[in-house]
Image (cartoon, rainbow, N blue to C red):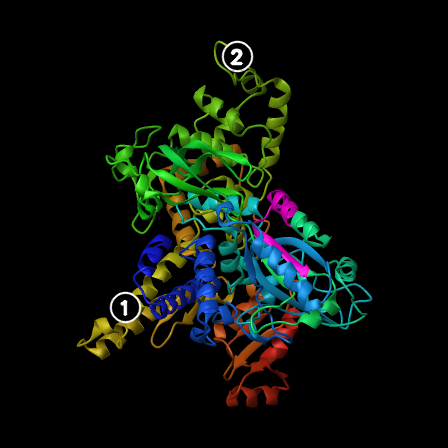
Amino acid sequence: MDLFDYAAKAEKQTVQERYAELCAVIRRNNELYYAKATPEISDAEYDRLYRELEELERAHPELVTPDSPTQRVGNDLSEGFRKVEHPAPMQSIDDIFEHKPEQGETDAELVEFYARLERSLGLAAPKVVVEPKIDGCAVTLLYRNGRLEYAATRGDGRTGDDITANVRTISTVPFTLPEGAPELLEVRGEIFMPSADFDAMNEQRDADGLPAFANPRNATAGTIKLLDPAEVALRPLRFLAHGLGVYQGEELQDMDDWEALLTRMGIPYNKPIIRACGLQEVRRAVADINTLRRELGFATDGAVVKLDSFAQRAELGSTARAPRWAAAFKYLPEQRETVLRAISIQVGRTGVLTPVAELEPVKLSGTTVSRATLHNADEIERKDIRIGDTLLMEKSGEIIPAVVHVVKEKRPADSLPYSLYDAVGGVCPVCGAPISREEGQVAWRCTNLTCPAQAAMRTTYFCKREALDIENLGGTVAEALVNRGLISSPLDLFRLSVEQLGSLNLGTDDEPRRFGEKNAAKALAALENAKKLPLERWLTALGIPAIGTITARSTAKYQRDLAELADSPYLRTLLRLEADIDRYNALNPAGKDNKGKDKEELKAQREALRAEFDPAAAPYAERGYLALEKDGPNRLKLTNPIGSVATRNMVRYFDSAAGRAIMETLGALGINPVSAGYTENLNETAGGPLSGKVFVLTGALSRPRPDFEKLIAAAGGKPTGSVTKNTTYLVAGEGGGSKREKAAKLGIPVITEQELLDMINTPQD
C-alpha cells in the first residue's frame, strides 16, 4: 500500500482509526529505517505521514500517548553490540518543511520557527547558524583525557550500540587528540558514505547481479552494524561532527569556539556553517545551503538551523524528543514527471544485462536527466514499469536519478507488462548467445564469455585505477581495440606492439583519428608495471562476478599468489564445509522435519558427518581462516570470511575452461601476482592492540562468545578454548569456575569483558 492508497483509505476512517493506523505505519517504518536500514517508502512519503500524525495530535491532543512516534526518538539498537548509556540524552531534531507554492508561503514553517525563537528568548533577531543536514547515521564519540573511549549510535536516545571497533576503521576519526585536549569531550555527528563511492558500490553490485542499495544512508546504516570491523574497513565511510554532548574544558560560548576547538583537535566537522541574524538573513542562508549542497559530494535533504549561543540553547532546553533551539528545514524533493520512451539493455563486464530507462529529457535538481538505471528485471516488475508510462522522477540524495513510482492514471490503455527476457528474445543483444539467471539471483547474464560487449567492458574494467591502472586504454580505446580485431580479451593487451597500438583508429574510416605512438608508449609502460601489481589488484581486474575491490582485498589475506588461489584447497574446503553443515543441521533430532524419525540414527549420522568435516576445518580454524560456531541448540554455522557467493564464483571461474585458459595465458606471459595482504595466521596478526596475546573466554558474557572471539582476532589477538601456561588473559563473566581455578593456579590474570574492550579500544604507544 503506498501513500496514495493511505490517503484514499483515510477518507473512510474515524479519527481514532486513522490515528492508530498512522502510528502503526510510522512505527513499522521507523524499525525498517533505523534498525534494519531497509525502508519501504521514500523519505518524502514518510515525512508526509509523520506530518499528518502531528496535525492529528494538535487537533486531538487527547489521542497522544507516551509511545506515539512523535514523542520518541527513532530506535536503531541491534543485537550483538555492547550497550552504552549516553551521559546526556542523544535526541532527534524536529523537522520543519518547505511547502509547495500552491500551499502559500513556501518557507512558512521556517518563519514560524524563527519567530518562536524570538518569542522564547524575548530577543529580536537572535543569531543562528545554518548548515547542511547530512543524510547519514547519528553517532557520538566520547574522548576522555584525549583518548577515544567509545563511539556509539543514538539507539533509543538513552542507550546506544557500542560501535567503537567499526568507527576505528574510519580514517578521519582521530583515536587520540593533541596536547591541550579537554578532560571530557563528547562529539556528536554523522557517519555517511560519499556519493561517488556509493554510486561506484551500486555499479559494482549491478555488475555482480546483486540488489542495489536504496540510498547512501541505507548503505551506511548496514555497514556500521556489521560485526566484523575488518569488513567495515573495506567500506568508504566518513565522519563529520555537528554537535556537542557532555563537555569538561575551557568554556565554549558559541559555534565559533566549538569550531576552533574541533579544528585544534583535528576532528572534521560539517561545512559550510553560515551565520545569520534576522529572518531575511536566515532565509537567505537556507536558500544558499540548498544551492551549495549539490556540490558537497554527499547526500543531504535539508538545512539545520540552530541557535549560535550555547547559553541561549541551555535557556530554551528541550522536549522529551528534541531540542527547542534547533530545527531541520526539509527541502521539497524536486520531482518531475516524464515519459519512459524505451528501455535499453546494457551488457556489463560480467555479462549482466542491466535495463536502463530512456526518458523524455527532464530538468531535475539542476541537470537534465534523460536516462536512469532500472537495476534489474525484478525492480521493473516490483514497480510495474512499462514502456510509455509517465514516471515520477527524483534524485536520490540530489545525486542519482531514480524512479519514485509510475503515475498509473496516465498509463496508456494499450500498455503491456515489461519482460526483460522477452524484450531481448532470450538472447544477449550484443552477441546473440543465450541468457540465463541462476536460482536466487536477480540478474540475467550473457552466457558467452567471449561476447564483444563483455570484451570491451572487461578491458575497460581491467584498466581502471582500482584494478591495474593502465593509462589511456579504457572506454573508447577498448571498444576500438575489440572492434578492429586487435584483442578479444584483456590479456591480449600484453601482446600489442607500439606500432599496432599507435596506429589504432579511434574514429571512422572516413574520419580517422590515430591513438598515437606517444600514448601507445605510455600505455605499454603501464602494462609492464601491471605485471608487478599485487594479487588483490589482479583479482579485481579479472572481473569475476561478486569479486570487487573489497572482496579481492579480503581474499588476498588467505592466498599467497594467483596460482595458489586458482587451485585453492581452502576455497574448496569452505564450499564443502558449507554443504556438510547444511546436511548436519538437517539431521537435527529436534528439528520439525525429523519428527517420527529414529533419533539415535540421526545422532549417529551427525556424529559420522562431523567426524569428517571437523578435521577438514581444524587447520584453517587454527589460523583464523574460518570458524565453526554454535547457531542455537543442536545447530552449527560456518563463518566464511570471503562470502559464500564469492567463494563459489571463484572456484567456478578457475575451474571453467575460460579460467584455465586465462591461467595458461598468464603463465605464458610470466605473470603470477603475489598477495600484498597475505597473513599466514590471522590469529596472530601483528600490529593490533592485542598482538601476541592469547585469550580464553569463560562465564556468562553480554554477547555471544563468537562475537568476542572475532573482536579479539580482528585486534591481533588469539582466542583459544583452554587455559594453558601460554594464556595471557582469562576473560570472565559470571561463573566459569574451573577455568578461573586453573588460571589462578597458573598465575594468569582474570579480566572483565569491559577491560578486554578497553584494551581493544585504547591505542598502543
- Is 729 positioned to the left or the right of 643 in the image? right
Label 1, residues with CA under 10 Å away: few <14, some 14-19, many ≥20: some
Magenta highlight range: 286-306
Q: Is residue 301 visible?
A: yes
Residue 307: x and y, percent? 70, 62
When the figure is inspected, residue 68 is found, relative to residue 526, above or below; the finding is below
Q: Amino acid at mark 2?
A: Pro
Residue found farthest to the top: 510
Structural crowding at the residue carrying mark 2, measured as other residues with C-alpha within 10 Å and reported as few (<14), some (14–19) or many (≥20): few
Q: Nearer the viewer, residue 308 or 559?
A: 308
Q: Is 165 or 113 nearer to us in this picture?
A: 113
**Which residue is the site of mark 1?**
586
- Determine which of the numbered discs, if any, sits on residue 263 in the image: none
Residue at image point 60% right, 30% down: 471
Name the kind of residue labelled 1 in the image. Answer: Ala
Label 2 vs 1, first from the N-terminus: 2
Direction from residue 582 to residue 681 in the image, left or right: right
Badge 1 marks a residue whose secondary structure is helix
For image coordinates 82% across by 67% down, the residue present is 180
Q: Is residue 187 left or right of residue 563?
A: right
Task: Give coordinates of residue 751: x percent, y percent.
Answer: 62, 82
* Residue 277 found in image quarter: bottom right
Q: Which label number is shown at residue 512?
A: 2
Membership of 674 in magenta stretch: no
Quarter of the image containing the C terminus? bottom right
